[in-house]
Amino acid sequence: MLDQIPADSRQAVVVTGDAKDSARGRLVLYRRTGAGWLAGPSWPAHNGDKGWTDDHHEGDLRSPIGVFSLSDAGGLRPDPGSRLPYHRSSHFVAGGTGFQGEPLAGSFDYVVAIDYNRVKGTSPLDGTRPQGYGKGGGVWIHVDHGGPTHACVSIAAEHMRELLRALDPKQHPVVVMGDAASLAG
């Protein structure tokens, strides 16, 4: 997967799932230096309820494997200091409960849009799907609600705020995501 990171990318959010069918993993923000990639803190993460796939489709409950740019952020809460364009809206609402009965309230307080089947430079709420609606979309990094997601990656609220403050569009950030075996291969 390192070969797929664009040469101008100086930041890579690496999400490594525990296994192909696991909804748990770790998120680490790396920065590229003259000496190579340096790791920042490692945070627990959730991903799709059924794990990972290299052929994501709407409703498959798997997170897409790949390298995707990160260009836009937003949320229900005020901007915590994001350098990415931040789109605050009352439409960032998640209601009900998750797969394990956990409340979803607050999940979209902060989000970073993963540029999977979306138009860069638009609000994460933009529903345009260039590859068609069957390929899914609306895949974000968002606040963890304590259980698996539909296809997103989630981390604790305090880590979301740290991530939003760290990501810099001048560094051309990307997310590298998948289960450990797929990322190694």
Image (cartoon, rainbow, N blue to C red):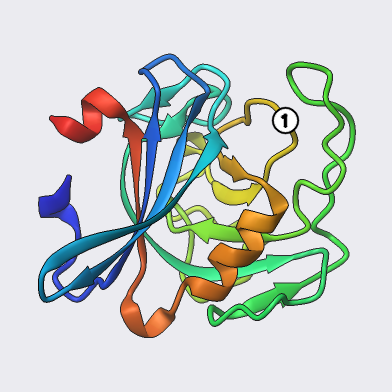
Residue named by callout 1: 146
Q: Secondary structure at mark 1?
A: loop
Number of numbered discs visible in the structure rendering:
1
Question: Crowding near pointer 1: few (<14 within 10 Å), some, many (20+)?
Answer: some
Q: Quadrant of the N terminus?
A: top left
Residue 92 picture location, percent across and down:
80, 57
Q: Residue at x 82, y 44 (%)?
A: 94
Residue 136 picture location, percent across and down:
51, 39
Residue 123 picture location, percent across and down:
63, 70
* Front residue of 134 and 179: 179
* Front residue of 34 and 83: 34
Residue 104 picture location, percent across and down:
82, 36
Q: Quadrant of residue 9?
A: bottom left
* Front residue of 36 and 139: 36
Q: Is residue 109 toward the left or the right of residue 142 in the image?
A: right
What kind of residue is marked 1? Answer: Gly
Q: Residue at x 68, y 26 (%)?
A: 147
Q: Is residue 37 toward the left or the right of residue 112 in the image?
A: left
Q: Is residue 141 toward the left or the right of residue 57 in the image?
A: right
Q: Quadrant of residue 61?
A: top right
Q: Residue at x 57, y 74 (%)?
A: 165
Q: Is residue 63 visible?
A: yes
Q: Quadrant of the C terminus?
A: top left
Q: Is residue 126 visible?
A: no
Look at the picture and state if 166 lies above or below 66: below
Look at the picture and state if 9 lies above or below 146: below
Q: Residue at x 78, y 58 (%)?
A: 109
